[in-house]
Image: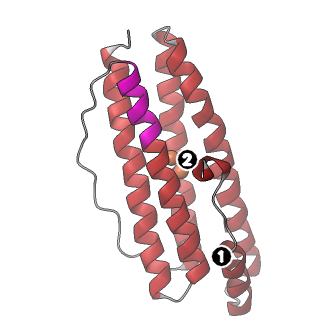
């Protein structure tokens, strides 16, 4: 039986994953308005992945007989300043999500909840990948500075993002 504390924390996590989707959509709109269509595309795909993350937690709660209690999602910022600031904000947010996943994992260990630990292991690895891929984009953008041609090159690279195996399933 899943513990009440884990049920509450997973419900909280569904909210954070949905907020992530919301934030990436806001970022996608910000980029699209500035004709950075590659960035916008990348952010939209990121948003879809976040909904998938929320669904993993949602389905896990249902499978384990935990009560799903959906919470209100905060509104994300509208303005992001610059393309590099958008990516820096993404990275900062993913670091926060990683800390949330680690908190959940710690709880699952304390509660002796093995199924929750197995489910969360996927998220531990996923967060390592998310942070690494966003960090690479941030570093590349900083390396190029404010060169417009370089920005367009990154935009072209981001336009090429295809759905991960998870989304194709
Ligand atoms: Fe996520
Ligand atoms: Fe994420």
119 sits to left or right of 71: right
Mark 1 crowd level (few <14, some 14–19, many ≥20, 10 Å Cα): some
Q: Classify mark 1: helix, strand or loop.
A: helix
Q: Position of residue 154 (x, y in %)?
A: 71, 78
Q: From the image, tell me which residue sits under label 2.
A: 95
Q: Classify mark 2: helix, strand or loop.
A: helix
Q: Is residue 66 visible?
A: yes
For residue 159, the mark is 1
Q: Position of residue 121 (x, y in %)?
A: 61, 28
**In which quadrant is the N terminus drawn?**
top left
* 35 shown above or below 104: below
106 sits to left or right of 65: right
Q: Earlier in the sequence, mark 1 or mark 2?
A: 2
* 126 shown above or below 83: above
> Main SS of the magenta segment?
helix
Asked if the stretch drawn in magenta spans residue 56, the answer is: yes
75 sits to left or right of 53: left
- Label 1 CB sits under 8 Å from any ligand 2 atom: no
Asked if the stretch drawn in magenta spans residue 168, the answer is: no
At horizontal 70% and vertical 73% (from top left) the residue drawn is 160
- How does the figure colour the protein chain or chains? secondary structure
Q: Is residue 81 visible?
A: no
What are the residue bounds of the magenta stretch? 55-64
Depth check, mark 1 against mark 2: the one in front is: 1
Residue 118, quarter of the rendered image? top right
C-alpha gap between disc 1 and disc 2: 24 Å
Q: Looking at this rendering, what residue extends furthest in the front direction? A: 169
Residue 4, quarter of the rendered image? top left
Q: Position of residue 11 (x, y in %)?
A: 33, 33
At horizontal 71% and vertical 89% (from top left) the residue drawn is 147
């Amino acid at each position: 039986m899943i513990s009440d504390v884990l049920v509450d924390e997973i419900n909280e996590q569904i909210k954070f994953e949905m907020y992530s989707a919301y934030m990436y959509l806001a970022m996608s709109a910000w980029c699209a308005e500035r004709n950075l269509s590659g960035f916008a595309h990348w952010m939209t795909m990121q948003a879809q992945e976040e909904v998938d993350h929320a669904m993993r937690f949602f389905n896990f709660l249902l499978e384990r007989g935990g009560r799903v209690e959906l919470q209100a999602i905060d509104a994300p910022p509208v303005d992001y300043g610059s393309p590099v600031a958008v990516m820096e904000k993404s990275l900062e947010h993913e670091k926060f999500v990683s800390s949330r996943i680690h908190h959940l994992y710690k709880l699952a260990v304390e509660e002796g909840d093995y199924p929750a630990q197995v489910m969360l292991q996927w998220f531990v690895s996923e967060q390592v990948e998310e942070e690494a891929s966003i960090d690479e984009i941030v570093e590349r953008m900083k390396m190029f500075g404010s060169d417009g041609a370089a920005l367009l090159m990154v935009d072209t690279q981001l336009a090429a993002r295809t759905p991960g195996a998870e989304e194709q399933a």
